[in-house]
Amino acid sequence: MDTSNSLIRGFTLIELIVTMVIIGLLAVVAIPRMFDIATFRSRGFFEEVLNAARYGQKLAVASGCAVQLSISGGGFALYQRQNCTGGAFSRPVPRPAGSGAFAAASPAGVTLSATAAAVVFDSLGRATPGGVTVSVDGRSFIISGESGYVDGS
């Protein structure tokens, strides 16, 4: 059997280098456009504010003490009164995992707005004022008054 005349198949070094250059250009130009980090930050912050509102309402019912959700363009925070019966909302609500206050600042480039600066959930879960709309970069949810339901669908 003579193997000297058989063809050797494979890629040349030039073909491999050109392929690597094309893949590199795609990685530098196309992939960052497909995965825009600002979109992920906006969506993540929306979910965080939505969950803070839901947690505040549930905490008010479970503890029997009112909870305030404060919203500003710079971020949000949950507060309770120093004593349950009255006074200012000045005690920060801790996160469920116990890692600091349940508050967050808006990420760079993310816009947070609400039709009211603060929503108070009473011990029955009702929200005052009712019908508050909270928006994060075009996504929004509504906090109903009488039920305190946070509709983020």
Image (spheres, grey):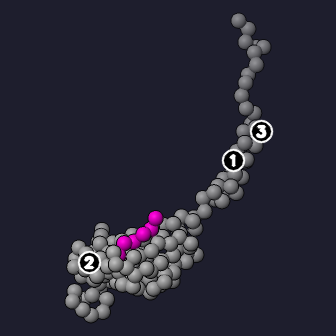
Disc 2/disc 1 C-alpha distance (Å): 59 Å
- Name the foreground residue: 37 vs 150: 150
Q: What is the secondary structure assignment of the residue under circle 1? A: helix
Q: Earlier in the sequence, mark 1 or mark 3?
A: 3
Query: Which tag is nearer the camera, tag 2 or tag 1?
Result: 2
Q: What is the secondary structure assignment of the residue under circle 3? A: helix
- Residue found at x 49% / y 81%: 114
- Residue found at x 56% / y 72%: 138
Vertical placement of 111 versus 30: above or below?
A: below
Q: Residues within 10 Å of mark 1 (few under 14, many from 20)?
A: few
Q: Do the CB atoms of the residues marked 2 and 1 lie less than 8 Å apart?
A: no
Name the residue carrying label 2.
124
Query: Which tag is nearer the camera, tag 1 or tag 3?
Result: 1
Name the residue carrying label 3.
14
Disc 1/disc 3 C-alpha distance (Å): 14 Å
Residue 99 visible to an observer of this rendering = no
Q: Do the CB atoms of the residues marked 2 and 3 lie less than 8 Å apart?
A: no
Vertical placement of 104 versus 27: above or below?
A: below
Region in magenta: 148-153
- Residue found at x 28% / y 82%: 122
For residue 68, the mark is: none
Residue 19 is situated, as x and y percent measured from the top left of the image, at 72, 42
